[in-house]
């Protein structure tokens, strides 16, 4: 059975279809980014595609569709919207902080050190200058070292 | 009297709204039950002793929300291009940004805005020296990011919360 | 007519979401590190929520909405608990 159960007029079907496709496309792009990007800190940006605009499009499509079908405003999708707006950034922030903590305890050279702990590396760096490469003698990680720089307000 | 029975009116109103949305009704019974539940639940927050907040400058809040929404759509497009394209030479990296804002609600809002925008993630905050470490997926110039965060978001949030 | 258009596009969208879930599941299974697995799990549950919402549109019933809400709540709790564990669980030093 390919057809949907509820029958809606064409002017309602087309926006719903487009929004659902756009949302699914963004989610697929974001998840594909999980495979494509090379380091963890790059990959953490990828799922935000699906969890911001992607799920937003699907929720708007769902609200619109059910409002047309039931001929009354169906707004309870707003709950999921609020839930996603509140929880997605919190979860990602916790995860990023945990990853940074783990990388620091392992001495991974790709992450910036905590300032004040390492006397050899003065942080913040001089005005507009580049901080020295952290631990140049350490063995290179599997990913190319990302540019770690410190910037001061000018 | 008001402050004793309804210490957090905004939280209570939001909880009552959630109750009505979940029940999908605006019948008097649901409104009454929702109001009782909302007032009872919001009084629990008194135990947490959270700092008070007064909603001010509603226009600024609306404008900031619009800016954030536009920015989320734009960054979605940019990050999707980075993932699907095969551009070489893209660098990602950490940027440390000094902050002037101290208000916990303002910092919370800033953290959520930065993390919810694809392409930037709030990683670490130091409250004694007041700086924040963010990770940027497409890092061209750090100064630009410092300026964006400070002018576009921090200045507006300080206007709202401080 | 419109039901057929909507039906086919939703089918395509569901296939795309299924592929997205497969990508996330690959990240959960292969790692390479624990934080990658947690990130994959986070993506997986967001995609599952969207899949449930499209099922809801397709079947015209709002039952799927509640399932999506529960997945969202549990997914957030799972991700934050796992992140906390990654921070504090390894007390080796």
Image: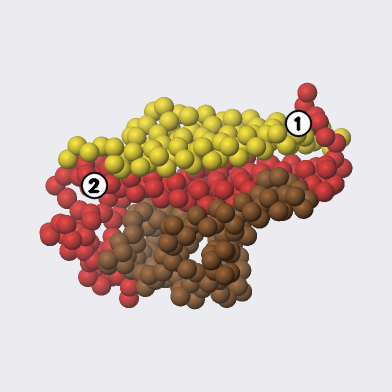
Q: Which class describes the residues within 10 Å of circle 2: few (<14), some (14-19), or many (20+)? A: some
Which residue is denoted by mark 2 in the rendering? A104
> Residue lying farthest top?
A1
Chain in red, by letter, is A
| Of C14 and A91, the residue lying toward us | A91
Left or right, C14 with respect to B86, comes to right
The quarter in which the N terminus of chain C is drawn is top right
Tell me which residue sits at (37%, 41%) in the image. Answer: C83
Determine the colour of chain C. Answer: yellow
Q: CA distance from mark 1 to mark 2?
A: 49 Å
Q: Where residue C59 is drawn, which disc sits there?
A: 1
Q: Where residue C17 is drawn, which disc sits there?
A: none
Position above or below: B98 against B134: below
Foreground: disc 1 or disc 2: 1
Residue B44 on image: x %, y %:
50, 54
Query: Do we see residue A56 in this rendering?
Result: no
């Amino acid at each position: 059975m390919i057809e949907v159960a509820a029958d809606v007029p064409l002017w309602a079907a087309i926006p719903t279809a487009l929004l659902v496709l756009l949302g699914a496309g963004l989610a697929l792009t974001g998840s594909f980014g999980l495979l494509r990007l090379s380091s963890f800190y790059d990959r953490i940006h990828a799922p935000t595609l699906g969890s911001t605009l992607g799920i937003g499009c699907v929720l708007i499509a769902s609200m619109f569709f059910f409002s047309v079908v039931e001929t009354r405003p169906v707004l309870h999708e707003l709950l999921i919207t609020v839930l996603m707006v509140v929880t997605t950034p919190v979860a990602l922030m916790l995860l990023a902080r945990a990853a940074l903590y783990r990388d620091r305890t392992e001495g991974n050279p790709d992450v910036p050190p905590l300032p004040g702990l390492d006397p050899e590396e003065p942080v913040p760096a001089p005005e507009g200058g580049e901080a020295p490469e952290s631990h140049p003698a350490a063995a290179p990680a599997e990913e190319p070292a990302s540019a770690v720089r410190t910037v001061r307000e000018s | 009297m008001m402050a004793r029975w309804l210490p957090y009116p905004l939280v209570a109103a939001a909880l009552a709204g959630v109750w009505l949305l979940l029940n999908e009704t605006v019948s008097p019974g649901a409104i009454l039950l929702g109001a009782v539940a909302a007032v009872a639940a919001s009084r629990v927050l008194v135990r947490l002793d959270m700092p008070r907040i007064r909603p001010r400058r509603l226009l600024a809040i609306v404008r900031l929300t619009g800016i954030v929404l536009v920015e989320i759509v734009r960054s979605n497009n940019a990050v999707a291009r980075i993932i699907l394209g095969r551009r070489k030479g893209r660098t990602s990296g950490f940027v440390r940004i000094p902050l002037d804002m101290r208000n916990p609600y303002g910092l919370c809002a800033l953290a959520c805005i930065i993390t919810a925008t694809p392409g930037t993630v709030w990683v670490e905050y130091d409250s004694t020296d007041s700086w924040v470490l963010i990770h940027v997926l497409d890092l061209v110039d750090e100064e630009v990011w410092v300026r964006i965060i400070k002018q576009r978001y921090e200045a507006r949030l300080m206007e709202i919360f401080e | 007519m419109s039901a057929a258009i909507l039906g086919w596009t939703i089918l395509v969208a569901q296939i795309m979401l299924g592929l997205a879930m497969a990508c996330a599941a690959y990240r959960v299974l292969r790692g390479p590190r624990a934080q990658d697995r947690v990130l994959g799990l986070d993506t997986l549950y967001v995609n599952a929520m969207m899949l449930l919402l499209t099922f809801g549109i397709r079947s015209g019933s709002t039952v799927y909405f509640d399932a999506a809400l529960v997945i969202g709540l549990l997914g957030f709790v799972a991700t934050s608990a796992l992140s906390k564990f990654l921070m504090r669980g390894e007390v080796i030093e």
